[in-house]
Image (cartoon, rainbow, N blue to C red):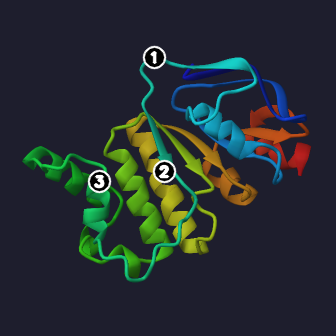
Amino acid sequence: MILDVHNLTMKFDNRTIFQDLDFQLQEGSMTALLGPNGAGKTTLIRILLGMLAPTAGSFQFDEHVKLGYVPQFRNIDPEYPLSIRSFIELNGPLFKSKQFKQEVDHELEEMNLTSIQHTRMGEASGGQKQRAYLAQALLDKPNMIVLDEATASLDPSAKEELMALIQHLNKKHGMTVLFVTHDVPLAKKYMKEYLYLDHGTVQAGKIADFQEVYS
C-alpha cells in the first residue's frame, strides 16, 4: 500500500467539504479521481501534497514515496524566453553537472521533446508545454505522480500523447498515478481504478465499472 487515508475530514468555517474519507492506493496503481466541480478534489490533493492541514483524520504515505506533481495547463506568455530544455532545467541545481545534463537528455527523450528542446516555451503547443512540466517533475525521480487536471484545455491528440506517456511510466517504471480529471472517457481508457468524490463522501472501484454505477 502506497497511501492510506483514514477518516479524513475538511471544513472551511461552517462548510464541510468532505467527511470521514477512507481509501487506499496500492503501489503501481493507476487511479482517476473523479467528481463534480466543488466536490473537494482540489482540496484533497492540496492536503495530500502537504499544502493544507485537514480538520480531522489522517493520511499516511509509504515511507519510500517521492511525489511528483503536474498542474493544470497554465498559459505561458508567447514572449516567454526560456527554451523547453532551459525550462525543464529550472528544477535542478544552479551548477548543471554532466550527470544532470544527461538526466535532462533522458527526460527529453522519454517525453518526445528532444527534437524541439530549443523551442521557446512561449511558442510551444499546449501538449508540448504539459510534457515539459512532466519532464520537469520527473527530474526529481518520483515513484508516484499526481496529475491535477493536467489534460484540461489540451486538444484530443495532445491528451492522448500525454496519457500514453503516463501509461508508459506506469508500465516501465512502476509509477503510481493519481489522475484528477473530469474526462471520464480518457480516464476509462488509461486508468484502472477510480475514486469518486461527491456529497462529502468517496466511492472506490474499478474504472471499467464506473459509468454503470455513477454516470
Callout 2 crowding tier (Cα within 10 Å): few <14, some 14–19, many ≥20: many
Tag 1 residue: 63
Front of the two marks 1 and 3:
1
Disc number for residue 166: 2
Disc 3 target residue = 107
Q: Amino acid at mark 3?
A: Glu
Can you give x and y, in whole percent of width and height, for residue 38 in the image?
Answer: 82, 50
Q: As shown in the figure, which amino acid type bears the numbered disc 2?
A: Ile
Q: Nearer the viewer, mark 3 or mark 2?
A: 3
Res 6 visible: no
Q: Earlier in the sequence, mark 3 or mark 2?
A: 3
Q: Residue at x 36, y 53 (%)?
A: 136
* Residue drawn at (24%, 74%) of the image: 118
Q: Is the C-beta separation of discs 1 and 3 under 8 Å? A: no
- Taking 129 as reference, is 43 above or below it? above
Q: Residue at the front extreme?
A: 13
- In the displayed structure, 197 sits above or below 89; it is above
Real-space Cα distance between discs 1 and 2? 23 Å
In front of the other: label 1 or label 2? 1
Question: For the residue labelled by badge 1, is the local secondary structure a helix, a strand or a loop?
Answer: loop
Q: Position of residue 67 (x, y in %)?
A: 46, 35
Picture layout, residue 183 above or below residue 157: above
In this rendering, position of residue 177 left or right of residue 77: right
Q: Residue at x 90, y 43 (%)?
A: 213
- Residue 157 percent across, percent down from the top left: 55, 73
